[in-house]
């Protein structure tokens, strides 16, 4: 036996017995080195083919012996893989006596000597039965030599390989061509499975041809190969799954190698770039993935180049646009990440990008809506305030001059109420377009309320601002809004505020513009009111605007307080004591504020209803807690506004408060002014009737101040008439006022209504009203208002 790797690395001891050469003398040499010149080249070619793994047929050649003679050998060779690498393994059989030196030894003697010294399993078959095995075969199979002899040629083969093994053995013994080397799976005695590299052939032995096989255990290598094959199959499956996944996701994916050259595109990337994968592979990313800045329209840096250079994830800066191969553009968001192997080396990169065109459009729309009115398309109030604040800062920093113009439409509510909201929306759109057409260069138009617009005129002096305002007033005065078969003429009020270094902050400028516009509207509309620092009309408006914030705050923090003022019975018609509940407001310094200061603003801005509800609740709570000292005979009068009198929900509120407090309705008297009752006579009649049905009574306040007082009196089922204080105070100075007071008193008595004279401030007036037979008197000469104790708030 011999093994060769660029020269013999192993020679069995049988070489010395056959050739005379000791094994150590052969090591490092090729077999051809020991062949006669005429046989050396042929032997050298055979060795090369064996080393290359070609499995050439056996070679019969001459071999020089150590004694100088020659010997004919038959060489069988194969290639095996070992831990040290590929190795050529062979068997040399003596084919005859030594040339020129007769040798009587038999071939079998040489064969056995050779077989017993090799680590390769050797099996000899004769007539399909084993006739010889060496010790290496026993070690490989686990069977003893006695157990192996006589076995069938296929008994050692695994069931998977038995049929093909039998076919090969039969064909070989019959001299048919068959493969001489193949891998075979065998089953050992203990049932385990081994893989062998099997070489077979026919050799003359003992005067007859027998089948010779050599088996080299390659189980370890085979297991590694199978594991590698399974790993490769699994990796291939994983690769296929990855490919399917990448092909099915909604993002574009481009993969590059370590040089930045593309080696993969998924279908989404193909669609967005316009390049097929076959065309793109091998190309640099910048040629296929062309991205530019959405605003600057300049190419953006190659994300893969930076990613590979810095070894980290890189995202494109700013809003990016991908330009497809045909010029179509997509807004994209992308990132490039490095791909690393197990040792951490960068082997490439992957670019993932998404078409965000729709999202980018939504973002632009959201930014637009954040600054613009969605109905008219002009700026909204928030954006106006932002730009106005900047204009104020510039005026203060550079002593510049700007102007703010407020525009209020008078007939918008009429259009909305008569033609519907669709018509109202169309009116606002047309007005916005009309105002925009008059907007000077650098000006800004905004919608700041339902039917209110504002213009910010930067770098504009007050003279130029007046001219713009006058143009707008004239245009809108001539403007006609047509809807279906109807036509409407718009009224408009404009407030103009110059903006200079001394104009104050944002809130002051906005309040001044709103107040100036309101003044223009209160003075009849179709006019411009320009704000001035000492403008008294605007000052009054400022005061009212302050109450818009103070009144709700007072309702929450308990700043409102109740007083009461007795009403003195004067004659036989006054059968019970009366007392009027009055409202006051305590300011931050603890001073009392008269209702005359805040009631007009509360009525104008429709806050009076909330005040009335608070008064009813507080008064009934106080009376239920015994604030009157247990005097249950007194009837308390609570003032109601015209807005509450016409509000059906307020009636339900009173009924609920009466039930919750337990105060008898007969102890309540509601006081309403003549003008409030007449303003909505039908609804006032229903409210009065409902409360009187429970036992409550009513006082008609300020009677005589209206133009048709007596005409309405018969339609209002009241219990008391309170004569207007202007008439009562004038009784001592003139006969006309005395006559009017007397007439009112007489008419009231004829209708069964008791009378009350208010504003009785001195003894002379008190005696005068007593002399006229008036039933009650109220005023400072009788008693000043006193606090009505309220239960503490818990």
Image: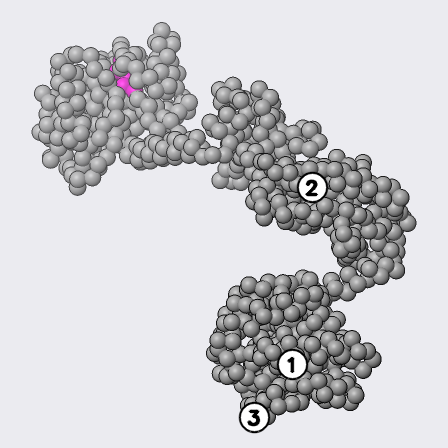
Which segment did they paint magenta?
71-77
- The answer to whether residue 10 is left or right of residue 429 is left
Tag of residue 755: 1
Residue 713 drawn at (x, y percent): 61, 70
Image quadrant in which you'd find residue 737: bottom right
- Residue found at x 11% / y 22%: 128
Image quadrant in which you'd find residue 491: top right
Among all residues in the image, which is located at the extreme right? 399
Q: Which one is in front, 205 or 578?
A: 578
Q: CA distance from mark 1 to mark 2?
A: 48 Å
Could you tell me what secondary structure mostly forms the magenta stretch? strand
- The answer to whether residue 532 is left or right of residue 703 is right
Mark 2 or mark 1, which is nearer the start of the sequence?
A: 2
Q: Which residue is mark 3?
A: 630
Among all residues in the image, which is located at the extreme bottom? 630
Which secondary structure lies at badge 3? loop
Q: CA distance from mark 2 to mark 3?
A: 62 Å
The quadrant of the image that shows the C terminus is bottom right
Q: Which one is in front, 574 or 310?
A: 574
Residue 305 drawn at (x, y percent): 62, 32
- Residue found at x 59% / y 41%: 423
Q: Which residue is mark 2?
A: 489
Which secondary structure lies at badge 1? strand
- Residue found at x 49% / y 22%: 277
User: Is 281 contained in the magenta span?
Assistant: no
């Amino acid at each position: 036996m011999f093994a060769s790797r660029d020269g013999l690395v192993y020679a069995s001891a049988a070489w010395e017995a056959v050739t005379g050469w000791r094994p150590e003398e052969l090591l490092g040499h090729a077999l051809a080195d020991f062949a006669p010149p005429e046989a050396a080249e042929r032997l050298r070619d055979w060795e090369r083919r064996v080393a290359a793994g070609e499995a050439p047929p056996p070679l019969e050649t001459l071999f020089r012996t150590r004694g100088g003679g020659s010997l004919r050998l038959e060489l069988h060779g194969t290639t095996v893989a070992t831990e040290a690498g590929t190795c050529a393994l062979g068997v040399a059989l003596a084919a005859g006596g030594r040339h020129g030196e007769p040798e009587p030894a038999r071939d079998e003697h040489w064969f056995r000597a050779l077989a017993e010294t090799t680590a390769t399993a050797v099996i000899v078959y004769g007539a399909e039965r084993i006739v010889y095995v060496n010790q290496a075969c026993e070690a490989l199979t686990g069977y003893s030599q006695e157990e192996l002899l006589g076995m069938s040629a296929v008994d050692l083969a695994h069931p998977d390989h038995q049929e093909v093994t039998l076919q090969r053995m039969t064909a070989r013994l019959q001299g048919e061509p068959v493969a001489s080397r193949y891998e075979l799976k065998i089953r050992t005695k203990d049932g385990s499975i081994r893989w062998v590299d099997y070489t077979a052939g026919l050799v003359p032995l003992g005067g007859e041809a027998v089948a010779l096989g050599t088996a080299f255990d390659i189980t370890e290598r085979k297991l590694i190969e199978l594991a590698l094959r399974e790993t490769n199959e699994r990796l291939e499956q994983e690769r296929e799954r990855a490919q399917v996944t990448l092909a099915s996701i909604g993002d574009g994916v481009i993969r590059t190698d370590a040089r930045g050259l593309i080696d993969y595109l998924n279908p989404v990337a193909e669609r967005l770039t316009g390049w097929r994968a076959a065309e793109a592979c091998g190309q640099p990313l910048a040629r296929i993935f062309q991205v530019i800045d959405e605003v600057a329209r300049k190419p953006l840096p190659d994300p893969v180049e930076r990613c590979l250079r810095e070894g980290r994830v890189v995202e494109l800066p700013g809003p990016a646009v991908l330009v497809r191969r045909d010029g179509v553009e997509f807004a994209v968001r992308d990132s490039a990440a490095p791909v690393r192997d197990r040792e951490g080396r960068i082997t490439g990169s992957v670019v993932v990008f998404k078409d965000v065109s729709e999202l980018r459009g939504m973002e632009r729309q959201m930014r637009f809506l954040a600054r613009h009115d969605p109905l008219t398309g002009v700026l909204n109030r928030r954006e106006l305030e932002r730009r106005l604040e900047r204009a104020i800062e510039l005026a203060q920093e550079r002593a510049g001059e700007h102007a703010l113009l407020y525009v209020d439409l008078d007939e918008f509510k009429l259009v909305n109420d008569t033609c519907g909201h669709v018509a109202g929306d169309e009116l606002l759109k047309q007005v916005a377009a009309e105002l925009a057409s008059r907007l000077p260069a650098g000006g800004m138009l905004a919608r700041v309320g339902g039917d209110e617009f504002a213009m910010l005129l930067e770098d504009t002096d007050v003279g130029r601002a007046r001219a713009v305002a006058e143009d707008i007033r004239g245009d809108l005065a001539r403007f006609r809004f047509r809807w279906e078969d109807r036509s409407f003429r718009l009224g408009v009020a404009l407030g103009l505020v110059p903006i200079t270094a001394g104009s104050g902050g944002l809130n002051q400028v906005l309040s001044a513009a709103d107040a100036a516009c309101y003044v223009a509207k209160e003075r009849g509309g179709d006019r411009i009111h320009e704000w001035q620092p000492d403008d008294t009309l605007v000052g009054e408006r400022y005061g009212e605007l302050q109450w818009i914030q103070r009144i709700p705050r007072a309702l929450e923090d308990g700043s409102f307080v109740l007083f009461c003022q007795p009403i003195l019975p004067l004659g036989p018609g006054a059968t019970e004591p009366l007392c009027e509940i009055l409202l006051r407001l305590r300011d931050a310094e603890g001073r009392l504020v008269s209702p005359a200061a805040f009631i007009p603003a509360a009525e104008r801005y429709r806050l009076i209803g909330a005040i009335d509800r608070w008064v009813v609740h507080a008064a009934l709570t106080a009376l239920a807690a015994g604030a009157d000292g247990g005097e249950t005979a007194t009837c308390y009068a609570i003032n109601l506004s015209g807005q509450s009198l016409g509000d059906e929900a307020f009636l339900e509120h009173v009924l609920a408060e009466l039930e919750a407090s337990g105060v008898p309705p007969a102890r309540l008297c509601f006081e309403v002014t003549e003008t409030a009752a007449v303003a909505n006579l039908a609804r006032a009649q229903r409210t009065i009737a409902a409360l009187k049905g429970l036992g409550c009574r009513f006082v008609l306040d300020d009677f005589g101040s209206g133009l048709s007082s007596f005409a309405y009196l018969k339609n209002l089922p009241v219990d008391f008439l309170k004569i207007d204080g202007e008439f009562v105070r004038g009784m001592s100075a003139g006969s006309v006022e005395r006559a009017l007071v007397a007439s009112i008193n007489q008419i009231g008595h004829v209708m069964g209504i008791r009378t009350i004279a208010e504003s009785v401030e001195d003894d002379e007036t008190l005696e005068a009203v007593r002399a006229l037979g008036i039933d009650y008197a109220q005023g400072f000469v009788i008693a000043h208002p006193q606090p009505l104790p309220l239960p503490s708030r818990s």
